[in-house]
Amino acid sequence: MQVLSPVKNLKPKLFRHPEEGPGDNAAVITHAPAKSDRITYPFVDLIRFISTIGIVFIHAEFFLTSNEVTFFHKVHHIEYYFLMRQVFKFATICYFLIAGFLLADKIEGNQRIKYFMRRLKVIVKPYALAVSLFILGFILDRAASQKLSGPFVIETVKYILGYTSFWYVPNYLICLLIIVSFSKYVKSAWFGAALFLMTIVYTYLNVYSVNHTSSHTTALLGFVFYMWLGIFIKKNGIVQKIQQIDPLLLIGITVLIFALSNYETWYLFNFTHTSDSLNTLRVTNQLYSVAVFALLVRLCGAKAPDFGVFRPKQETYGIYLYHCFFIFYIIPGIEKWIAKHYHVSFFSYNVFHLIAINLLNFVICYCATTLLVKFLVRYKLAFLPYE
């Protein structure tokens, strides 16, 4: 038997290659007194809030088998399941867009280095704590079946940083460092074109190449273009132009691209060798993500939406960091316990069963993670930003 990795069964039973993470949580422009020079962008929190819901929803997939491609091909009308998941596939790119938008005024002159260091201070501590706890949990979870060794720990760290939701922060910081380092060129369309070309290369390698890497999480520089695009949108007043477009036109465009995205997913799944037909970097999904961004900007009014008990500014980063604990450990444990004590099998080739489980896991994960983060923020724990 060929051994491919010193780490056995890295992929959890309930978790598909995760996709996405949150945006520039600390760089939020909030309501301020009239005498302040700080500006409010209501659509930023709206996009952040909806995208966070989308990230948790996508990651809460019910993972029935270690070979999801083989399994999905046995599910009748799997396209219904893919269609449901496509709805929120805009989340990752929208995070980079709002991160760039908020960055636009902070990278000029000597501000850029100070801003980058502030971002490190806010982001790295809570991230380091969460990822360390997750790695520890991952190792303990496999202690009974896997001998603790250097190669095992190294492969575990590589997997978690590259193929779980923890991929986002290192990727974001690298993209931010590129933008800060080349800040004098951000106004140049040529610079944007170079970044766009980089994204196209990653798109080909991750989606369309015969030897594709199968996950957008390996596209280390595949999203820096969208951070630049957010800056370009801010510096050229494109938000104001979007707000003048007929919303029905934007809705129509978004629905049309959504349909094309679903068609591409269906084609990739049935007629190509791709193992990730819902990859975020699909051409149609990139267009869909930008369309959703524009639509949400247009639909959001001049006043910040009422999120009820939810606080996107304070809670988004914490939800990103800790929702995977529920997906990897807590929810699978609950389902395993139910299956053992009540003789309930969660395995099914019924597409509506998959959809129902995905929705149920999402509700449990999102609500539980939000409650946990509220507790951590309330008592200023885990280094999470609370202002």
Image: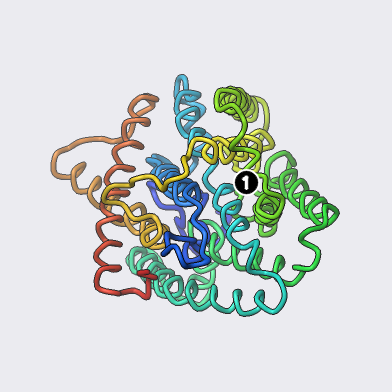
Which quarter of the figure is the C terminus placed in? bottom left
| Residue at the outermost top position | 77
Measuring from the top left, give residue 146's x and y in whole percent. 40, 66
Q: Residue furthest left?
A: 341
- Who is closer to the viewer here, 240 or 361? 240
Q: Residue at x 62, y 43 (%)?
A: 240
Residue drawn at the location 45% of the way across and 28% of the way down: 81
Q: For residue 210, which quarter of the picture?
A: top right
The colour scheme applied to this rendered structure is rainbow
Query: Residue 196 at x, y = what percent?
Result: 77, 49
Q: Is residue 33 visible?
A: yes
Q: Position of residue 323 (x, y in %)?
A: 36, 56
Residue at which label 1 appears: 214
Are there few (<14), some (14-19), or many (20+) residues within 10 Å of tag 1? many
Report whether residue 276 is seen. no
In the rendering, at what x and y percent does residue 175 appear? 66, 63
Secondary structure type for disc 1? loop
Which residue sits furthest front? Answer: 35
Q: 265 or 103: nearer the eye?
A: 103
Task: Give the residue at the far right of this rendering.
Answer: 190
| Position above or below: 119 against 211 | below
Near-viewer residue (340 or 100): 100
Q: To which quarter of the image does residue 30 belong?
A: bottom left
Name the amino acid type tagged 1. Answer: Ser
Quick check: 211 above or below 100? above
Of 183 and 86, nearer the camera is 183
Residue shown at the point (56%, 47%) measured from the top left: 94
Quarter of the image where one finds residue 269: top right
Q: Is residue 64 above or below residue 30?
A: above
